[in-house]
Image (cartoon, helix red, strand yellow):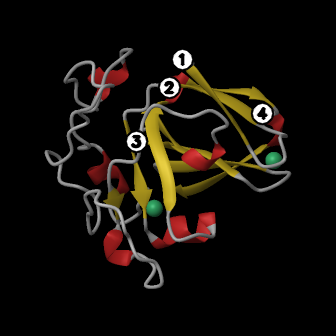
Amino acid sequence: MRRLALDGTCSCGAVQFSVEDQFLYAGYCHCSRCRRSSGSAFSAFAGIQKEKLQVTSGEANLSTFARNDDNVRSSCKVCGSFLFAVVRNAEFVHVPLGTLVDEPSIRPMFHIFVGSKALWHEITDALPQFAELPPPESLDRGGPQASDSTSMGSASRSTGSTAAEVPDLRPRLDREGE
Ligand SMILES: [Zn+2]
Ligand SMILES: [Zn+2]
């Protein structure tokens, strides 16, 4: 049986966190900032309500960097691993999937900021691609984890809600990417 909480950690283990296995959306961000911060072609991230993530060990080892007013990123100050970003009016966190020790139920659903992706990287899967952010109505969470049709607005802070679309990313993350 799948665990209800997922463990995550930085590469050195100085910071550990736990996050509920209830991500609302997940995707790949190809924006230049994610390329820089990850050192790779894109970031793989998943979003969830902020209160569903808890730092369980080493909180004093976190350092934060505000990419912008609505994207405050926490990293391990010992090893530099990026661990999560507080986004969307500080109500949600984006978690880089590579930090998870356990397997999440969710799978990446889309590619965003493909318009600025690395020219040396070729996308070879069939997931939807968006030049920047997806249009609000375009993404249906669907799948076995869908438990209701609550949108990702403030109403979705109740437990078990599922994103029917990804509308709220747009106004706050315009031009910034994940
Ligand atoms: Zn570390
Ligand atoms: Zn990005």
* CB contact under 8 Å: marks 1 and 4: no
Residue 90: tell me if it is visible.
Answer: no
Choose mark 1 or mark 4, whichever is in front: 1
Disc 1 marks which residue?
Answer: 4
**x, y percent for residue 85:** 55, 46
**x, y percent for residue 60:** 82, 36
| Front residue of this view, candidates 121 and 12 | 121
Q: Secondary structure at mark 3?
A: loop
Disc 3 marks which residue?
Answer: 88
Which mark sits nearer the N-terminus, 1 or 4? 1
Which mark sits nearer the N-terminus, 4 or 3? 4
Residue at x-position 34% and y-position 60%: 111
| Front residue of this view, candidates 37 and 175 | 37
Disc 2 marks which residue?
Answer: 21
Q: Quadrant of residue 10?
A: top right
Disc 4 marks which residue?
Answer: 59
**x, y percent for residue 22:** 44, 25
Label 2 crowd (10 A; few <14 / some 14-19 / many >=20): many
Choose mark 4 or mark 2, whichever is in front: 2
| Front residue of this view, candidates 2 and 44 | 2
User: Label 4 to label 3, Cα distance in Å?
Assistant: 22 Å
Q: Secondary structure at mark 1?
A: loop
User: Label 1 to label 2, Cα distance in Å?
Assistant: 5 Å
Q: Secondary structure at mark 4?
A: helix
In the drawing, does residue 13 fall left or right of residue 9?
right
Vertical comparison of 76 with 23: above or below: below
Which mark sits nearer the N-terminus, 3 or 1? 1
